[in-house]
Image: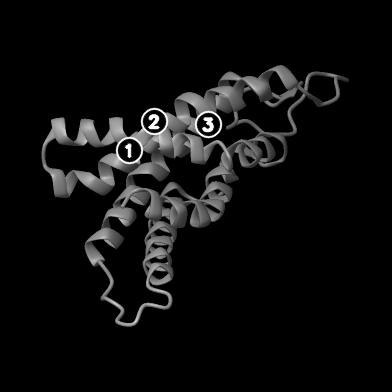
Amino acid sequence: MPSLMVVTIQSAILKAAANITAQTLSQWGAEEPTELDWARVAEFAVFGLVSAPLVCFWQRALEESFPTQNGVVSNPHAQSTARKKDQPHRLNWRNVLLKLFLDQTIGLFFINVIFITCTTGARLQSTSLIAREIEMKIVGILKAGWRIWPPVALINFLWVPWQWRVVVTSVVGFGWNIILSFLSK
């Protein structure tokens, strides 16, 4: 399992790289390209630093509360091979679907509020202005997210151990953060 620090640094680098990519793509074909907005890159990096530990905690809490498989000790710190005597590992669809629902409602809302705050907070410098920005952008970002994240979350819950789920979401998140760069201008 990668350490929390490694996952956090990886997340910050991938989110910053996604924003650089988005800025580069937005200038494609421009007669006179502008310089990169490094403040914007830094905002995405900060979002990666803030969000990765929270997503790690969230994934762990979901798996502890709603284990993907029956017969597995619900504490993810325990060995994944721990079973009840003679009981095979069986997929618990109720828990998988419950995790999917919670992740795509509460989790997605919360992480995107953090995104909007990280990418506008330094510029707006007022909680009322940040709240207004969240109010204006959150529904559009959630709708866009629901086109991408449910299949990723389902794959994560079914086949990826909870310790590696943030890595998977960070890699897929590279593309998502390019989209967020355009949606959050």
Alpha carbon separation for disc pair 2 and 1: 6 Å
Query: Which label sits in the foreground, 1 or 3?
Result: 1
**Residue type at tag 1:** Ile
The residue lying at 20 percent from left, 36 percent from top is 130
Alpha carbon separation for disc pair 1 and 3: 19 Å
Marks 2 and 1 close (CB-CB < 8 Å)? yes
**Residue type at tag 2:** Phe
Label 3 Cα neighbours within 10 Å, binned few <14 / some 14-19 / many ≥20: many
**112 w.r.t. 66: above or below:** below
Label 2 Cα neighbours within 10 Å, binned few <14 / some 14-19 / many ≥20: some
Which residue position is annotated with label 1? 114
SS for tag 3? helix
In percent of width and height, residue 167 lies at: 54, 50
Marks 2 and 3 close (CB-CB < 8 Å)? no
Which residue occupies the foreground of this view, 129 or 71? 129
**59 w.r.t. 41: above or below:** above
Label 1 Cα neighbours within 10 Å, binned few <14 / some 14-19 / many ≥20: some
* Tally of numbered discs: 3
SS for tag 1? helix
**94 w.r.t. 27: above or below:** above
Alpha carbon separation for disc pair 2 and 3: 16 Å
In percent of width and height, residue 14 lies at: 44, 60
SS for tag 2? helix
Which residue position is annotated with label 3? 60
- Left or right relative to 72: residue 87: right
* Farthest residue, direction front: 31
> Which of the 4 image quadrants contains residue 112?
top left
Marks 1 and 3 close (CB-CB < 8 Å)? no
